[in-house]
Amino acid sequence: MDAIKIEGLTRRFDDLIAVNKISFNVKQGEVFGFLGPNGAGKSTTLAMLSTLLEPSEGKAHVNGFDIKHRKDEVRKSIGMVFQDSTLDEELTAWENLDLHCRLYGVPGELRAKRILDLLKLVELEDRKDSLVKTFSGGMKRRLEIARGLLHEPSILFLDEPTLGLDPQTRNKLWDYIGKLNKNKGITIILTTHYMDEADKLADRIAIIDRGKVIALDSSANLKNKVGGDVINIETTDPEAVQKFVEKCKFCKEAKRHDGKVTISTDHAEKKIPELISLAEKNKVKIISVSINKPTLEDVFLYYTGKTIREQEASSIEHLRERRRMHSR
Ligand SMILES: Nc1ncnc2c1ncn2[C@@H]1O[C@H](COP(=O)(O)OP(=O)(O)O)[C@@H](O)[C@H]1O
Ligand SMILES: [Mg+2]
């Protein structure tokens, strides 16, 4: 049985389609990454799957339970760590976990052991009696993960688990998440707009943009689709470069963005001399050329024509425009 089955799931907020007919399955024991820019619809999808938000259309099953008709069973079988902290800062770590046990009906005789085991797992046992308000961002996240696991769910949802954390803390959290999956066999669905996070953790990645899943595969397969190599050309005239590059026979794809032109090709190192001479012939000044293996950023660019950062900037602009229209 698949851990999650999603068919045509859709959510509208007035005239905005936040999630647009998405369909995919998540296998049991998988770490599944949901990658996309801010505003793409990741949190809305998790909110529907965890029964906190009604879908406008479509259906989904979590652990075999219909999210519309079997809400209680769905909730009991999942753990959820939200994008924004929902810990009670005025309580200690232990008290936060104990409260959750009571809410979820974890039997009294099991509570203390389970809380202690999970505090050990996230290396917070020595801080069990400290108030949460004295914790760093990374410690709070770890405590939230522990809390999400108290009722022993088989699926854990993590919404932007390392948002705002420093690189070292992020690395540490990635270790915990990986271990949870490997040692406990918990299916993990995480959302992120960090490419490296999806790359590092996820067995398969669904790339979501403006409410739609635009690609879904393992990181390696997604990158293979882009091609062997990526050449980045920085130039004073990206439009002209894109034009002559697109006519080259070796170019699979040329995208213009941020004053750069990105080309997907094979054996890039052999193509550079030709590119330079083409630039000279076309009287275009090239500032720099670099070659890299495709990254998930290149995958996103390949499918959308924009980098994730540019897409975020344009969706903020889009939102402002909508507000202006409404306020008129
Ligand atoms: N409660 C809501 N009311 C209106 N619009 C919302 C609401 N929640 C989310 N949205 C909009 O839906 C879109 C997707 O949001 P979200 O799922 O939070 O994206 P992500 O988690 O990928 O950043 C955004 O445009 C957001 O502004
Ligand atoms: Mg979100």
Image (cartoon, helix red, strand yellow):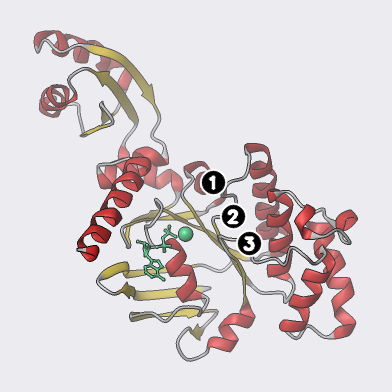
x, y percentage for residue 235? 24, 18
Relative to 316, is 72 above or below?
below
Q: Residue at x 28, y 21 (%)?
A: 233
The residue that disc 3 covers is 85
On residue 161, the disc is 2
Query: Toward the viewer: 141 or 251?
Result: 141
User: Real-space Cα distance between discs 2 and 3?
Assistant: 10 Å
Q: Residue at x 37, y 44 (%)?
A: 308
x, y percentage for residue 93? 81, 63
On residue 197, the disc is 1
User: Real-space Cα distance between discs 3 and 1?
Assistant: 19 Å
Mark 3 or mark 2, which is nearer the start of the sequence? 3
**Neighbour tally class for label 3: few under 14, some 14-19, many 20 plus, Cα within 10 Å:** few
Q: Residue at x 68, y 50 (%)?
A: 137
**Neighbour tally class for label 1: few under 14, some 14-19, many 20 plus, Cα within 10 Å:** many
Q: Nearer the viewer, mark 1 or mark 2?
A: 2
